Amino acid sequence: MDLTKVIVTGAALLLSLYCQSQNTTSPYSILGIGDIETKDFGRWYGMGSANVALSNPYYINAANPASLMGLNERMMSFDLVNRGKSARFKYPGADSLTPTTKDLSIRRISLAFKPNKKWAFSVGLKPFSSINYLLAETNTMYSNSSALAKAVDGSGGLNQVYFSYARKLNKNLSAGLTSSYYFGSANIQTSYYGSDLSISLVKQQYDIMSAFQFQGGLQYLVNTSKQVQHRLGLTVSNATTVKRSTAIAYLSNGTDVKQVNETKKDFKLPLSVTAGYALVLNNDFTISADAMISNWKKQKVSYPGSYTTTAGRLSIGAEYINRKKIGNYWVENWHLQGGANAEKNYISIQGNDILTYALSAGFGKNLSGLISIYSGIELGVKGSTKKGQIKEQFTQYVIGFTLKEFWFNTKKYGRYQ
């Protein structure tokens, strides 16, 4: 099987699916630079994404660049993750939930290679934040008491393209560095209409955003016996600035009447630190926990009484791996996961934090020496109507696959299979 053809065909199909299926409205994405993804939608999603201290010979762990040293030597890995989401919302004062909204999108495309025992690298593309909302309100005009309706439709977000490099420092310690470039836009259309308006008014705002950021990572492992291994993980991302420029056009009855170009106030991204610990028993059963904190500086966002605040996430998960013997090697056959996480959002509204709680489960299997699949599901709640917030009840699932192929798998370099 030609690995390159499989990669290109699979990516094309899922990109087509993504373009046709994204329709979820997310009310909280109106704030800041949108909904920021703080978890990796990958192989460890079913463990509550508690994977900073973990690595695997077959799967790419994008949460910590140092984990690349855990890949099999001379194995080229291609990973594609797809996420589906359905959600219902309850607004303060409402008696029932809204109808279900749905979304299907690609969450990560990545490629990794470990040419020898000393170093490895990975490149990838994934969303960093998403903007997708529709806000409608009606106000009364004081002059004649007539109603004026306003609809705000926002879409876009930031994408992250990254390059990771990892190196073995000694037998038990690995280090890595990820360099990321963020790019994207926010397309915001505001329409005004009413029975007494003789014309239609539209404000079209287009924000272009970009930034650079670096993430350093460490992984350290200690074998206290043949059956027990302790793993520690740490990542640190530097504070940086999202540069923003804005183009605004005003239209009347579809005709452009005015255009304005301006530099919008830059948006500060925080210093973020994540620490993780994992206990591995008999190389089959793993218990893992992560703690993340992001030191957001206080910034006003485009909503009354809202500003950025210190954010954080706690995750815990467990995994069982079933192995089978092929030749002289024991390889992973399938895995089963469970986990939970709690998160404090980076936006505070009217002095109240936005909290998210979720439970997750996952399953994956190696279909052959070339293809592995994995899946995960998460059930959660975001926000609280008791705090005057929109309550979101959501279900998320991931389906991903990894294509693997050994390079230089010859007698000269040594064979794995």
Image (cartoon, grey):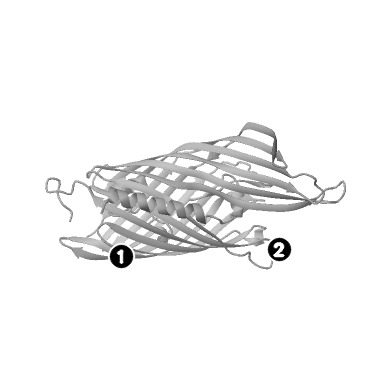
In depth, the one of 42 and 382 nearer the eye is 42
Relative placement, left or right, of 92 versus 221 is right
- Whether pointer 1 and pointer 2 mark residues with C-beta atoms closer than 8 Å, the reply is no
Q: CA distance from mark 1 to mark 2?
A: 47 Å
Task: State whether residue 342 is above or below residue 159.
Answer: below
Asked whether residue 327 is in view, the answer is yes
In depth, the one of 164 and 87 nearer the eye is 87
Which amino acid type corresponds to the residue marked 2 in the rendered image? Gly
Residue drawn at the location 24% of the way across and 58% of the way down:
369
Q: Label 2's element?
A: loop
Q: Which residue is mark 1?
A: 334
Residue drawn at the location 40% of the way across and 50% of the way down:
12
Relative placement, left or right, of 269 versus 389 is left
Which quarter of the figure is the C terminus placed in?
A: bottom left
Which amino acid type corresponds to the residue marked 1 in the rendered image? Trp
Residue 183, x across and y down, in percent? 49, 39
Q: Quadrant of residue 123?
A: top left
Q: Which residue is mark 2?
A: 93
Task: State whether residue 25 is above or below residue 377.
Answer: above
Asked whether residue 275 is in view, the answer is no
Q: Residues within 10 Å of mark 2 (few under 14, many from 20)?
A: few
Q: Which one is earlier in the sequence, the residue at label 1 or at label 2?
A: 2
Residue 52, x across and y down, in percent? 38, 52
